[in-house]
């Protein structure tokens, strides 16, 4: 983005997400002096206000792109390759999509997304380090628990120095229990009992992670093989206790409150529910004696 005149003395521009100013005239050496901070006299200039609004919009746009790609990935939804090609020129979309693992129509059509073009399709780096084009009409961005080549892909990602805009390859996963594991139980207590200073601290932790607080539960919804699961972690009553604790983790279908037996929970729903419970447990208040 170029520099805009802001009065007779300064020029302003948006650089790395913030408004910066420089002198409107160059030094005898042909250099422009960049101001360390935005001069007070420029704070309310219309050029500055518009740039600040643009910066805020760009931040929101980048966050929305990440959220959409994360939704496609967690849900393993088919995405038209033409759509990926159309949004690829947008820097925010490209940052969210670059190096996401995509899968085409065949079992060998898999790799890290490096480019998207409406005429040539998608260019990906395959698990063996080669580069191929995918021309399938749609691709998926599988949840890592569904990737049979996950360890191989992780090794290649480390070798290539891959940094994904959406956490996929190195996302923490939990394999679902077998048919007989857990018997007829419907609650996981592995991460229960995490203590917080107050209900508000626990609630704030949950919402900062992208989950919702609904009554006495923290919930996250996950689409898995066409079914929508609700993973829920119990939480203590804000009106009866000074401190707060997390409860057990359970799953239900849709918005129903009937708990599913653990063996009926899909692999993605299981992994994402455990990820939620683990993240809430990690944010607990650590006693002083334990922190040493």
Image (cartoon, grey):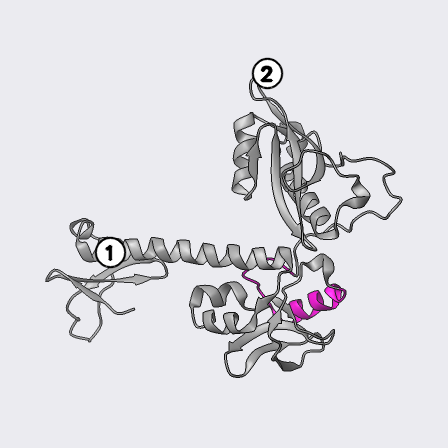
Is 186 one of the magenta-colored residues? no
Image quarter of residue 8: bottom left
Seen in the picture, residue 176 relative to 108 is either above or below; the reply is above
Quarter of the picture containing the N terminus is bottom left
| Earlier residue among tags 2 and 1 | 1
Percent from the top left, x then y, of residue 282? 64, 39
Residue 271: % across, % down: 71, 49
Q: Is residue 279 above or below residue 71?
A: above
Which residue is tagged 2? 240
Magenta segment range? 148-168
The residue pinned by badge 1 equals 50
Quarter of the image with the C terminus in it: top right
Q: Secondary structure at mark 1?
A: helix
Tell whether 86 sits left or right of 169: left
Label 2 secondary element: loop
Against 214, residue 266 (above or below) is below
Residue sitting at x 67%, y 81%: 130
Left or right: 284 with respect to 119? right
């Amino acid at each position: 983005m170029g520099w805009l005149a802001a009065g007779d003395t300064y020029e302003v521009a948006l650089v790395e997400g913030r408004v910066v100013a420089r002198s409107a005239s160059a030094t005898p050496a042909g250099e422009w002096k960049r101001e360390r901070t935005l001069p007070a006299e420029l704070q309310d200039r219309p050029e500055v206000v518009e740039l600040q609004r643009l910066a805020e919009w760009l931040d929101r746009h980048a966050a929305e792109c990440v959220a959409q790609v994360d939704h496609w990935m967690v849900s393993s939804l088919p995405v038209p390759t033409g759509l990926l090609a159309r949004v690829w020129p947008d820097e925010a979309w490209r940052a969210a999509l670059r190096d996401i693992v995509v899968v085409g129509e065949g079992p060998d059509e898999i790799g890290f997304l490096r480019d998207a073009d409406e005429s040539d399709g998608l260019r990906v780096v395959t698990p063996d380090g080669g580069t191929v084009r995918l021309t399938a009409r749609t691709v998926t961005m599988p949840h890592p628990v569904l990737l049979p080549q996950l360890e191989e892909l992780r090794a290649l990602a480390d070798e290539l120095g891959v940094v994904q805009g959406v956490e996929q390859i190195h996302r923490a996963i939990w394999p679902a229990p077998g048919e007989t594991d857990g018997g007829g139980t419907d609650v996981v207590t592995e991460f229960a009992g995490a203590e917080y200073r107050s209900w508000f601290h626990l609630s704030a932790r949950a919402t900062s992670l992208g989950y919702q607080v609904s009554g006495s539960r923290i919930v996250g919804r996950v689409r898995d093989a066409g079914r929508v699961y609700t993973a829920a972690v119990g939480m203590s009553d804000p009106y009866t206790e000074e401190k707060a604790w997390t409860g057990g983790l359970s799953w239900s279908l849709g918005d129903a409150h009937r708990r599913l037996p653990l063996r009926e929970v899909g692999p993605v729903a299981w992994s994402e529910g455990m990820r939620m419970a683990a993240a809430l447990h990690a944010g607990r208040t650590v006693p002083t004696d334990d922190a040493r």
